[in-house]
Image (spheres, helix red, strand yellow):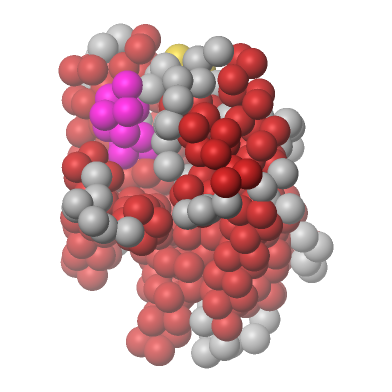
C-alpha cells in the first residue's frame, strides 16, 4: 500500500498482472489523486473541512479515478496534471452524491464509519455535499467546456436516477427493469463519464470516446450489481452480509427471487417482505437466498454484462491500457464469484 492510498485502490486488486512500469505509473497517479482529494475538500473553517473530508478519510474503492487513469493511458504521454484533475472531479462528484444519498436513505454508516447525517445532522450533510459539488465544478472548469458539459449532463442523470429511486416504479411497472434503470443513471452514468474523461485527456477520437462511454456504462452496472451479490454471499467483503436485505433495499438477486412462482419459495418471499431486524430472521433469509437459483441467475447476468463491456473495447488501440480495461471486467466479476 502506498502512502495515502487505500488498499482497494491498488490497480492489481482489479486488473491483475500487468507490466511493472505500467502498474507503477497507474499507482503513482492514483496516489497523487488520493493526496489531493483531502486538499480539494479543505474549506475556510475547520468544521466544514472536517465534515467534507469525513467520507474521503473513510477510504473507498476509488473505482472512478482508476477508470480515468486507465483510459488516459491510452495515450503514451497524457498530461498528468489533467489526469489528476479529471480523476478528482469524478471522485468529488461521487463523494458529494454519497452525502445526499445517506440523508435520503437515513443511513447509519458509510464505509464502516458513522454517516455524516448521523454524526452531525441532515442539514450539514446536504450542505457539505453541495460544497463538494462546488469543489468539483471549480476543478472541472480548469479542464475546458467539454468537460464541464459532460459533468453537468452526468450530474443531471445522477439526480434523475435518485429521484426515480425515491419515487419508486410506476404502478404495474417491472420492478427489475426500474431497478436497472435507476442503477444506470445513479452509478453507470458517472462511471461512464470517468472513462470518457480519461479518453478526453488522452486525446482519442470520437469513435474511441463512444467506445469508452459504452464500456463505462456497462462496467459500472457490473460493478454495482456485483455489490448486490456481495450483500448476500460474502462474509469477508468488509460489509456486513445482509445489510441491504435487512433494510429492504432491492437488489438483483432479491428481485429475481421475487419473480418465482414456486410454492417452495413461499417462506423466502415472506421473509423478503418481513421485518428482518431480528438476527435469526436475517440469518434465515440469507440462508434461503444463498441456496436460491436467483443467485446463479444473478451471477450469470453479471458475467454477461462484463462480456458486453469487454466487447465495447474493440475500437481502442492495443496496449497495456486496453489490456487493463479488459482485465477490469474479470476483476469486477471476481468480486461476486
- Identified at 62% across, 60% down, the residue is 297
Q: Which residues are magenta?
A: 95-106
Q: Split into 4 quadrants, where in the image is the N terminus?
A: top right
Choose top left, top right, bottom left or bottom right for residue 9.
top right
246 drawn magenta:
no
The answer to whether any part of residue 218 appears in the image is: yes
Q: Say left or right for 75 vs 192.
A: right
- Identified at 57% across, 34% down, the residue is 267
What secondary structure prevails in the magenta region?
helix
In the rendered view, would you say 123 is above or below 94? above
In the rendered view, would you say 205 is above or below 33? below
Q: How many discs mark residues in the rendered view?
A: 0
The answer to whether any part of residue 57 appears in the image is: no
Query: Residue 308 location, x and y as percent?
Result: 55, 77
104 drawn magenta:
yes
Query: Residue 310 location, x and y as percent?
Result: 60, 77
Q: Could you say which is closer to the camera, residue 119 or residue 108?
A: 108
Amino acid at each position: 500500500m502506498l502512502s495515502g492510498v487505500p488498499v482497494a485502490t491498488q490497480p492489481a486488486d482489479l486488473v491483475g498482472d500487468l507490466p511493472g512500469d505500467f502498474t507503477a505509473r497507474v499507482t503513482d497517479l492514483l496516489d497523487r489523486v488520493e493526496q489531493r482529494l483531502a486538499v480539494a475538500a479543505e474549506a475556510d473553517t475547520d468544521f466544514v473541512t472536517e465534515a467534507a473530508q469525513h467520507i474521503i478519510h473513510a477510504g473507498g474503492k476509488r473505482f472512478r479515478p482508476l477508470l480515468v487513469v486507465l483510459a488516459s493511458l491510452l495515450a503514451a504521454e497524457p498530461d498528468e496534471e489533467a489526469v489528476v484533475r479529471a480523476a478528482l472531479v469524478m471522485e468529488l462528484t461521487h463523494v458529494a452524491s454519497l452525502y445526499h444519498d445517506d440523508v435520503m436513505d437515513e443511513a447509519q454508516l458509510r464505509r464502516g464509519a458513522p454517516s455524516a447525517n448521523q454524526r452531525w445532522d441532515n442539514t450539514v450533510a446536504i450542505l457539505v455535499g453541495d460544497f463538494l459539488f462546488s469543489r468539483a465544478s471549480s476543478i472541472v472548469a480548469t479542464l475546458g467546456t467539454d468537460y464541464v458539459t459532460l459533468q453537468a449532463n452526468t450530474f443531471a442523470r445522477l439526480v434523475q436516477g435518485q429521484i426515480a429511486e425515491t419515487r419508486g416504479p410506476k404502478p404495474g411497472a417491472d420492478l427489475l427493469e426500474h431497478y436497472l434503470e435507476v442503477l444506470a443513471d445513479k452509478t453507470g452514468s458517472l462511471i461512464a463519464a470517468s472513462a470518457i474523461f480519461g479518453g478526453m485527456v488522452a486525446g482519442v477520437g470520437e469513435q474511441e470516446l463512444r467506445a469508452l462511454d459504452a464500456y463505462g456504462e456497462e462496467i459500472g452496472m457490473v460493478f454495482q450489481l456485483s455489490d448486490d451479490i456481495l450483500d448476500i454471499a460474502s462474509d469477508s467483503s468488509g460489509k456486513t452480509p445482509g445489510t441491504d436485505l435487512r433494510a429492504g433495499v432491492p437488489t438483483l438477486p432479491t428481485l429475481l427471487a421475487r419473480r418465482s412462482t414456486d410454492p417452495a419459495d413461499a417462506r423466502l418471499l415472506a421473509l423478503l417482505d418481513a421485518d428482518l431486524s431480528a438476527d435469526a430472521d436475517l440469518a434465515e433469509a440469507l440462508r434461503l437466498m444463498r441456496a436460491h437459483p436467483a443467485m446463479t441467475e444473478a451471477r450469470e447476468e453479471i458475467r454477461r454484462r462484463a462480456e458486453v463491456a469487454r466487447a465495447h473495447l474493440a475500437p481502442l488501440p492495443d496496449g497495456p491500457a486496453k489490456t487493463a480495461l479488459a482485465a477490469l471486467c474479470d476483476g469486477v466479476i471476481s468480486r461476486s464469484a
